[in-house]
Structure formats: structure tokens, C-alpha cells
Image: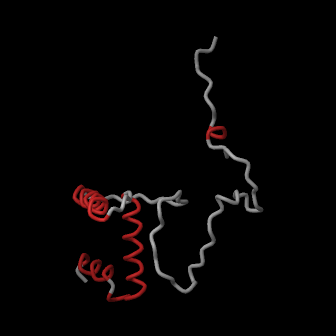
Amino acid sequence: MNRRASLPGAAELFRPTAQTERGDDGWPDAARPAPTNHHAAPGPRRGTPRQKHTSKITVYVSDEELLALEHARLALRAMHGLVVDRGRVVREAIAVVLADLEERGEDSVLVRRLRNDTGK
């Protein structure tokens, strides 16, 4: 008698739970990534709200940076009534910095700070 439990495989664990129509590219309509046009005229940049995102990056921060991020999140909640997670704060910060870079170029905060860090 085999004492090992029979466990489901990855195909069973990660299968779609609802019937979906699949297009020619194999993506369910609801999960198909939105087309991106990197050459379109830039509109106002916004961070994305809390949702399922299709891409992920790992960013390493110092203890002080993480503490400052958490303090900012708590301040947004306490003083402004905004209940957001750290990821949302980071996405908004990225959107603000990238919009500034597009708008101001050489005079952007990002360029100035990076130049100061590298000593150029």
C-alpha cells in the first residue's frame, strides 16, 4: 500500500475556473494584455489602481526606505483618508517621476538626482 498522498498537478491547480472564450492568440478575452503603443502621444501618466498586474519586478530597498514608504502609506491613510498599499504608492511615484522626465527632460528631478548620485 502506497502511503504517499495523491496531490493535484500544476495543470489542475492553475486551470481557468470559468469558461472563457479564447481568441486566436490563446488568451482569454478577460486576461488578454492591453495593446501598448509606445509611440503614441503621451497623455497624463497615472499609476495603476489595485488590480491584477501582468508584470512584476523586484526592487531592493534599504530598511530606512522601506520604513519611509510605510510611514507615507500610513500618513496617506491618517491625514488624507486614502487607504492604499505600498505597491500603489510605488506605482504612483513611478508615474510622477516618469511624467516629469517626459515633460522636463534634462531638468527633471530624476535626471538631476541621478546626476548628483553619479557625480557627473
Location of residue 41 in the rendering, given as x and y in whole percent from the top left corner:
55, 86
Using residue 36 as the reference point, say whether residue 94 is left or right of it.
left
Q: Is residue 66 above or below residue 14?
A: below
Q: Is residue 95 above or below residue 42?
A: above
Location of residue 44 in the rendering, given as x and y in whole percent from the top left corner:
47, 81
Q: Is residue 106 above or below residue 32?
A: below
Q: Quadrant of the C terminus?
A: bottom left
Using residue 105 as the reference point, say whether residue 43 is left or right of it.
right
Question: Residue visible at 45% across and 69% down?
Answer: 47
Question: Residue visible at 45% across and 73% down?
Answer: 46
Question: Residue visible at 26% across and 77% down?
Answer: 118
Using residue 38 as the reference point, say whether residue 47 is left or right of it.
left
Location of residue 28 in the rendering, given as x and y in whole percent from the top left corner:
70, 57
Question: Residue visible at 66% across and 62% down?
Answer: 32
Location of residue 102 in the rendering, given as x and y in whole percent from the top left corner:
43, 85
The residue closer to the viewer here, 6 or 2, is 6
The residue closer to the viewer here, 115 or 52, is 52
